[in-house]
Amino acid sequence: MNLAIHKENILFLDIETVPECETFERLSPVKKELFALKTAYQRKSKNPEGQDISPEDFYERAGIWAEFGKIICISVGYFTIQKKERVFRVKSFYGSEETQILEDFKQLLENHFSKAAHVLCGHNGKEFDFPYIARRMIVNRIDLPKKLNLFGKKPWEVPHLDTLELWKFGDYKHYTSLKLLTTLLEIPSPKEDIDGSQVAEVYYQQKDLKRIASYCEKDTIAVAQLFLRYNNDALLTEQELVFAE
């Protein structure tokens, strides 16, 4: 694709989200009603028999909406040059305190990725990750960093890249998952321990946040690998990955 952007100016990222409460019953009566209204169409369209799935049964998917979910992990990765060698550094912000996760992520943006040349990159990031983070910052009373405050910006001024959008080539009806693209483009990836549908269970029942962070980091690395593959650059090797403790 010959994308005219330096790799060192990109912050690759992925997020993991869960429903705000472990079960539907723990929501307030008002939130229960609002969730039922919000998901009315999806609950009918997802049922092969054409009948509504109950809000209780559908609640396990609540994490995909910023109004009913919360962020439990943000994993980031970025390229640096160390001793004339390419390095990809990976770091995760994760835990049960969403406000702290968002504050730490904001600090990273403001301290290290605030220049005009810096951009954020995710897979379906423009439709999910970036707006989700921004909405949850507002919910948590956190002022938006410049890289997420898009008010008044023209499309070409938005500092965001999206590996899904790049693959669409203008076909806005087309969706291709990260897993499908990495398989199609022969990008090697480590064996996945869990998938997205299991994150809430691992968080609420197993309480294994490190496992979730590891899963999130793999997707962040995969996004970076896609970017490299689009440009016909050499893919990252395990020796080039550096994980923050």
Image: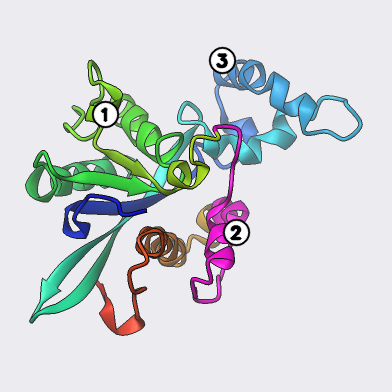
Residue 4 lies, in percent from the top left, at 23, 49
Residue mark closest to the camera, 3 vs 2? 2
Identify which amino acid the numbered label 3 is placed on: Val
First along the sequence among labels 3 and 1? 3
Give the numbered dot on residue 156. Answer: 1
Image side of residue 1 versus residue 38, left or right: left
Q: Which label sits in the foreground, 3 or 1?
A: 1
Viewer-side residue, 191 vs 66 = 191
Colour logic: rainbow
Q: Is residue 182 magenta?
A: yes
Residue 138, image x, y percentages: 29, 25
Q: Which residue does the image show at 29% across and 31% down from the upper left?
A: 137
In this rendering, position of residue 71 left or right of residue 185: left
> Is residue 59 one of those drawn in magenta?
no
Write the start and end of the magenta stretch as one range. Answer: 172-201
The amino acid pointed to by label 1 is Trp
Q: Which residue is mark 3?
A: 30
Q: Is residue 175 left or right of residue 203?
A: right
Circle 1 Cα neighbour tier, 10 Å, few/some/many (<14 / 14–19 / ≥20): few
SS at circle 2: helix
Residue at (52, 64) in percent of width and height: 182
Distance from Cα at disc 3 to Cα at disc 2: 39 Å
Q: Quadrant of residue 219?
A: bottom left
Q: Which of the numbered marks, if any, corresponds to residue 180? A: 2
Q: Is residue 155 above or below residue 97?
A: above
| Residues at circles 1 and 2 in contact by the CB criterion of under 8 Å | no
Task: Name the residue at 91% across, 31% down.
Answer: 49
C-alpha span from label 1 to label 2: 28 Å
Mark positioned earlier in the residue sequence (3 or 2)? 3
